[in-house]
Image: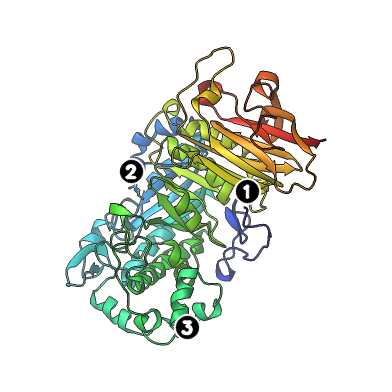
Amino acid sequence: MKKYLSFIFFIALTQNAFAQNPAIPHLIKTEATTQLIVKGKPFIILGGELHNSSTSGADYMRPLWKKIAAKNVNTVIAAAYWELVEPAEGKFDFTLIDSMVIGARKEKLHLVILWFGSWKNGYSMYAPSWVKNNPKKYPRAKDAKGKTLQHLSALSEVTAEADAGAFKAMMQHIRSIDEKEQTVIMMQVQNEVGLFNTPRDYNDAANKAYRASLPKDLADYISSHKGKLQPELDSVLKLRGYKLNGTWEDVFGKSFFDDRHWKALSYLTEELFTVYNYAKYIGKIAAAGKEAYPIPMYVNAWIKQPGAGGAWPGKYPSGGPIPHTLDIWRAAAPAIDLIVPDIYVPDARYTIAQYHRPGNAFFIPEIRPGVRSANEAFWAFGEHDIFGYAPFGIDDVDAGEDPITQTYRTLDQVKELIVQHQGKGTMAGILVDTVQRTQQLTLGGYVIKAELGRQENFSNILGRPAPKPPVIAGGILINTAPNEFYVIGKDYLLTFIPEKITDKSLLLDIEYIEEGKFVNGKWQVIRRLNGDEGTGGGDYGFGYAPQQPAATLRFQRQPDGAYSILKYKLYSYK
Ligand code: DGJ
């Protein structure tokens, strides 16, 4: 099941020009994983993103830091706004940045800062007034009919420089107040960039660039990465004989439009052109910021998705970091370390798998809050080696009402274990729901079937009423030694069957089940589960599994709907 059995270090993260300073937050990248290192140790972001306007008022934010920390969050993802950082050209105001850093520190929280600069959700709503009101100097994009759009054009060097100047000044300021403490651990450069209702910019500069030869830096990148490009790009280039001289359309072909299949790559050539221009612009800003303070920087995407959310470029913002455009980001914006998705689709699995590409193991900066994402978090950490997670609107409800509180309480305990097993093929994620009630995986020499629990699986032998039937269950399985697993979650059932049955007379049994917790990374047993709570409770103890030799496992109900951490050891006999 695990794709990354070979643990090959193949990328020394931020290559050459952007080599990172090990004393400040940085990334260590391998083919399979990315680890964020803070103060010398891998750091797992148990995050939450604030509403867009929350950090525009220090007083408004003051009571919220505590409320958020109560959710077991360790990192707040919070916006900094170009219009407030540079209200007049060249005049900077970092009061809000300072208050954010102070507020976070008081609750021992870290910060990932979002730079709402030239674009947010595609539009240029956070540009300062002196930019908004000077379209001659800071030109807008145009559609195919020549209509001026609200979006600042990504083809303007002048606008890029203005934005980069502000971002660099802010990074200098952050370094001056925070290099020692390292409250700020990462930066998002812009937010969900791209154009709506047109696959590309049609202003004069854009038309000229579209008709010109493919930029040399992109052509060079493609030729030096032949065979290692993203499959979508590779297949288009292959079809056209990898010809790299000529215009965008000579190289990538004339685009098609297919509105029936949401995965089809409609308007691909225009999209790649648009991505290139955004990536160049954002790469410049990130590079300027890194000159001042080279902490990790990423871009986030409004993702391609079925339905009204957007199946083709222009429906979703065209020019954003969609996974099939990863190579363009790498070629044109080497200062950007990762491309990451914002997830508001009903099931996160497809999107997460799409972004988990060699060298782009990532974190999820935004996901719709609620019970579903509180379970998907386990799956994403276990299955895709993400290094962080953040439901949106973390400042909304109180800790007791937010399902992420329990998820983070559990993940906080197992984070060291997760870090140790990232990229090694010894960890798996579980996610079962009412649509996909079962999941099968192989781990540690076993074929393991996970199944969403039914109400009867949780009724108590002494008649304690069963809770409502679960609708979703997320979890993590970690294989720590031969026949030994840590099993994290609730509301699902497991059946273990040996992957290879060499001796048919061999039977499988449970050696022990411990229910426990990690305190400062050390395992502490709370109860040894046996009898009614372990093997004697009927169907889901052991020995009654549908197929022999097989062993099964269920969770005990915890107060407050908490998740369990179990240490599960199997043995065989005959
Ligand atoms: C995605 C954006 O990136 C966020 O800033 C926020 O607007 C959310 N959508 C929710 O509306």
Please name the residue shown 38% across and 30% down the image: 397
Q: Quadrant of residue 156?
A: bottom left
**Residue at image mark 2:** 56
Q: Which mark is first along the chain, 2 or 1? A: 1
* Callout 3 touching callout 1 (CB < 8 Å): no
Labels 3 and 1: the sequence-earlier one? 1
Does the rendering let one see residue 183? no
231 to the left or right of 147: right
Q: Nearer the viewer, mark 1 or mark 2?
A: 1
**In this image, 92 relative to 382: left or right?**
left
Whether the residue under disc 1 has CB within 8 Å of ligand 1: no
| Amino acid type assigned to the residue bearing label 3 in the image | Tyr
| Structural crowding at the residue carrying mark 3, measured as other residues with C-alpha within 10 Å and reported as few (<14), some (14–19) or many (≥20) | some
Label located before the other in sequence (2 or 3): 2
Between residue 435 and residue 526, name the one nearer to us: 435
Please provide percent x and percent y for residue 291.
Answer: 50, 64
Residue 242, label in figure: 3
Is the CB–ligand 1 distance for label 3 below 8 Å? Answer: no
Going by the numbered disc 1, the residue's amino acid type is Pro
In the picture, measured across the screen, residue 72 lies left or right of residue 35, that is left
Answer with the quarter of the image where residue 143 lies.
Answer: bottom left
Residue 136 position, x and y percent, is 21, 70
Residue at the spot of label 1 = 42
Dot 2 beta carbon under 8 Å from ligand 1? no
Of tags 3 and 1, the one toward the viewer is 3
Residue extending furthest toward the right: 574
Marks 2 and 3 close (CB-CB < 8 Å) = no
- Residue 138 coordinates in the image, percent (x, y): 26, 68
What amino acid type is highlighted by mark number 2? Answer: Ser
